[in-house]
Image (tube, helix red, strand yellow):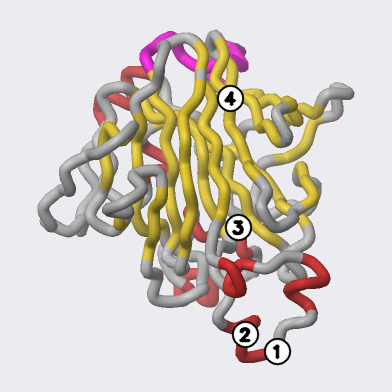
Amino acid sequence: MNAMDMLITDSEEEEEEAPNVKVVWPKAPSLQEWAEVLPTEGAPETPRQEPRGQVRQITPEVRQDEADPTRFCVEGKDRSWFLQKGGVVFDRPRPDRFRLDVTFSGGLQSRFGDDYAELSRAEQSDTINWLVAVGVARHDAVLTGYKDCKTTGFYFIFHLNYRRTRWRIVACPHNAELEDLSGQRFSCDPQEDDQFELDAYEGQTLSVEFAEGELFVAERNQRRALGKWAFNDGSTRLPDVKYFPAVLTSNCPTSLTAVVAA
């Protein structure tokens, strides 16, 4: 089972019932389809937190640090990676161009590569920070904390391999492609193997940059790949509406800082 299904499949039981069924991913919604999307059923009625710092919207599952409003934590129940748990939308300094920088924290619980391999089995089992989705939410979208990847905007899902040495990255909606700087395109179908990857290391900052209707994966202050979205009219750019930077967290213990820059 592909771990990328965290924000796609709703339960392990469903996966086991039809292991050989090829999933056909829907096309990205049109603006009219977005307008017809109903609120997700089963979302909790927990009161919303008061946004602080750059935060525009935050779901009850995410805890914003009292002393540092750029720090966020999620206490996931397990590491099954099947369910989204929480999300944050941020304000931006200008509507046409902005960047959201995400850096994982956690000390001994968030090691990478050789440092992770040298941990004891018990320490490895306590490791956090395996998956996050970073992208843009529509100006009128209200996060539920569940299934927002498909209904609120456009995102890049970053998922670590089991050795914690590489990020595998797919776009959501999944009928998109990622194009690297050389022009090579990569599938965003979570059931396939040909996905765009980046090296992973401790202290790394993963970024998503929005610029004039296009969404880029960035790292070390450099663009690494461009999202190519699929729409019925043949366009690969995002629809012409207002967007705000957003992070979606998984049902896995997560600790990160998130900062928006122009």
| Labels 4 and 2 touching (C-beta < 8 A) | no
Q: Residues within 10 Å of mark 2 (few under 14, many from 20)?
A: some
Inter-mark Cα distance, 1 to 4: 37 Å
Give the amino acid type for the residue marked by disc 3 in the picture. Answer: Met
Q: Residue at x 61, y 74 (%)?
A: 108
54 relative position to 154: left or right: left
Which badge, 4 or 3, comes first in the chain's sequence?
3
Q: Which residue is mark 1?
A: 120
Residue 234: say if magenta. yes
CA gap, disc 2 to disc 3?
Answer: 23 Å
Say which residue appears at 16% left-offset and 43% top-offset.
50
Say which amino acid is labelled 4: Glu
Decide whether residue 213 is among the magenta residues: no
Disc 4 crowd, CA 10 A, few/some/many (<14, 14-19, 20+): many
Crowd around label 1: few <14 · some 14–19 · many ≥20 (10 Å): few
| Towards the viewer: 170 or 76 | 76
CB under 8 Å between callouts 1 and 4?
A: no
Name the amino acid, label 2. Answer: Glu
Given the image, on which type of amino acid does mark 1 rest?
Ser
Assign a secondary structure to mark 4: strand
Kindly report the distance in space between the C-alpha atoms of the residues bearing marks 2 and 1: 5 Å
Alpha-carbon neighbours of circle 3 within 10 Å: few (<14), some, or many (≥20)? Answer: many
Tell me where residue 80 appears, x and y as whole percent: 51, 73
Residue 158 lies, in percent from the top left, at 62, 49
Q: Which residues are magenta?
A: 231-242
User: Which of the marked residues, 1 or 3, is nearer the chain's N terminus?
Assistant: 3
Q: Which mark is residue 123?
A: 2
Question: Looking at the image, do the residues carrying marks 2 and 1 touch, with CB atoms under 8 Å apart?
Answer: yes
Circle number at residue 4: 3
Residue 247 sits in quarter: top left
Real-space Cα separation, disc 4 to disc 3, in angstroms: 22 Å
